[in-house]
Image (cartoon, helix red, strand yellow):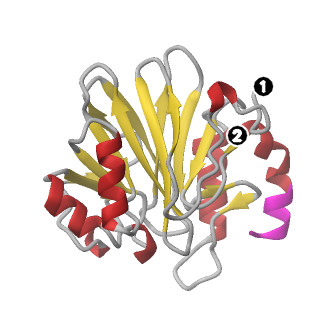
Amino acid sequence: MADVSERPDGYTGQVTPGGVSDVRELPDLVIRKASVSQQDNNAYLLTCRATGSQLLVDAADDAPRVLALVTEGTGGLDWVVTTHQHWDHHRALSEVVAATGARTAAGSEDADALPVAVDDRLAQGDTVTFGEITLDVVYLRGHTPGSVALAYADPTGHTHLFSGDSLFPGGVGNTKSPGQSFDSLIRDVSGRVFDAYDDHTWVYPGHGADTTLGVERPHLAEWRARGW
């Protein structure tokens, strides 16, 4: 099992707000990770190698930096997927969509809280396709009612999971505020992530460093016992 300390293909996932992107080159997909804002929000640009089509995960903040990230790829942008409705994950969304003409997608129960009209309301089991790349939608309720993760099954390797604020190194996302539910989130993360994907699955969260399911899996019982 590849854990985060091994850093395959030179990618580390270590980025700083406003700093340079980290790049992971897969056979069919290029993943670029950048950090924006004092909250260390991650934005991910996914580029289809065959077509140049691009998808952005979370236009979180600092529209000039996010638009610069887009130009680090092929320059165009077909989709912006917002992982959930919290303000720190969509502060640059309006400006990025206006500048690029990208279509928008978000979980169905979070879509109305975003500052732009959402073109595609996502549900569990849906897919998002750009170029020749297809991402599976994983609906993870609890941090918000309509949080989504996106899973890319690399045909030559392991799954890559963009988890938003639902799964981090060391635990699930925050559920201490009104309207949130730890029971719901741990149930969905357990059943729809840990039961569905193997230990090699690489997790790209909404803030901070990456992890793998293999690193986190032994701690699931601990998370349930502590309630966060």
Q: Dot 1: within a 10 Å radius of its alpha carbon, few (fewer than 14), some, or many (20 or more) residues?
A: few
Q: Is residue 223 magenta?
A: yes
Check disc 1 and give the amino acid type: Met
Instruction: Kindly indicate the quadrant of the structure image that contains residue 55.
Output: top left
Residue 29, image x and y in percent?
Answer: 41, 27
Q: Amino acid at mark 2?
A: Thr
Decide which of 216, 14 is in the foreground and name it: 14
- Span colored in magenta: 222-228
Dominant secondary structure of the residues highlighted in magenta in the image: helix
Q: Are marks 2 and 1 in contact (CB under 8 Å)?
A: yes
Q: Position of residue 166 (x, y in %)?
A: 58, 59
How packed is label 2: few (under 14 Cα within 10 Å), some, or many (20 or more)? many
Give the mark nearest the N terminus, 2 or 1: 1
Q: Is residue 125 above or below residue 41?
A: above
Which residue is labeled 1 in the image? 1
Q: Secondary structure at mark 2?
A: strand
Q: Residue furthest top?
A: 156
Q: Is residue 5 left or right of residue 191?
A: right
Residue at image coords 60%, 72%: 181
Q: Quadrant of residue 54?
A: top left
Name the quarter where the N terminus is drawn: top right
- Residue at 80%, 60% (x, y): give it: 223
- What is the distance, in whole Å, between disc 2 and disc 1 at their CAs? 9 Å
Task: Kindly identify which residue carries mark 2.
Answer: 212
